[in-house]
Image: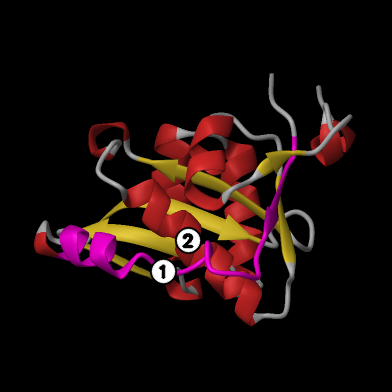
Amino acid sequence: MSCDMLVKLYGEKIAVDTELEKKLAAEGIVIKRGIACDRHRIREFILARFSENWADEIDSGILNGGCYVAVKDKAIVGVAGWDGLFKGFFGPIGVDESMRGTGIGKALLLRCLCSMREQGYRYAIIGWTGPQEFYAKCCDAVPIPDSIPGSYGDMVTI
């Protein structure tokens, strides 16, 4: 079941994985900041693979300076953001199904968390997590007790 998770942003665990990013670069995959002029491409990527809610949240994150994308051959293959729905929240994160298992998700996650730390955040909330093991392994995230359905429970549903 999905819950919110908490990540401590200070300390040694949260750092850009330069070795992973070098490996990805050798495969032609670059992690870069998502910028306003790429919003429509990022949105198209998300709508084709994930959901309109995710697209809206990332769109808001881009406007707040909180988005990274993974690009291969000038095509987006992964995206992650923060501060899209709520201040201090990381997510959503998504990688094209054909590219999963390559480390792109971890690279995007760590880039975002490092940027959040640089903006002054001491903790990040990962809202409504899917694979909790991924977050626990990559950044020592821990479940927040009694966080089901969490902040996302306030969304209007039709």
Residues drawn in magenta:
4-25
Amino acid type of disc 2? Leu
Q: Name the secondary structure under disc 1.
A: loop
Q: Are marks 2 and 1 in contact (CB under 8 Å)?
A: yes
Residue matched to label 1? 16
- The mark that comes first in sequence, 2 or 1, is 1
The percent coordinates of residue 99 (x first, y second) are 25, 39
Examine the rendered structure and indicate whether residue 68 appears above or below residue 64. above
The percent coordinates of residue 11 (x first, y second) are 61, 69
State the image quarter where residue 37 is shown: bottom left
Examine the rendered structure and indicate whether residue 134 appears above or below residue 149. below
Question: Quick one: 44 or 12, which is closer to the camera?
Answer: 12
Question: Quick one: 91 or 58, which is closer to the camera?
Answer: 91
Q: How is the image coloured?
A: secondary structure
Amino acid type of disc 1? Val
Q: Any magenta on residue 21?
A: yes
The percent coordinates of residue 49 (x first, y second) are 41, 34
Report the disc number at residue 155: none
The reply to whether residue 41 is visible in this rendering is no
Instruction: Report, in whole angstroms, how far the alpha carbon at label 2 lies from the one at label 1.
Output: 6 Å
Could you tell me which residue is drawn at 65 percent across and 70 percent down? 10
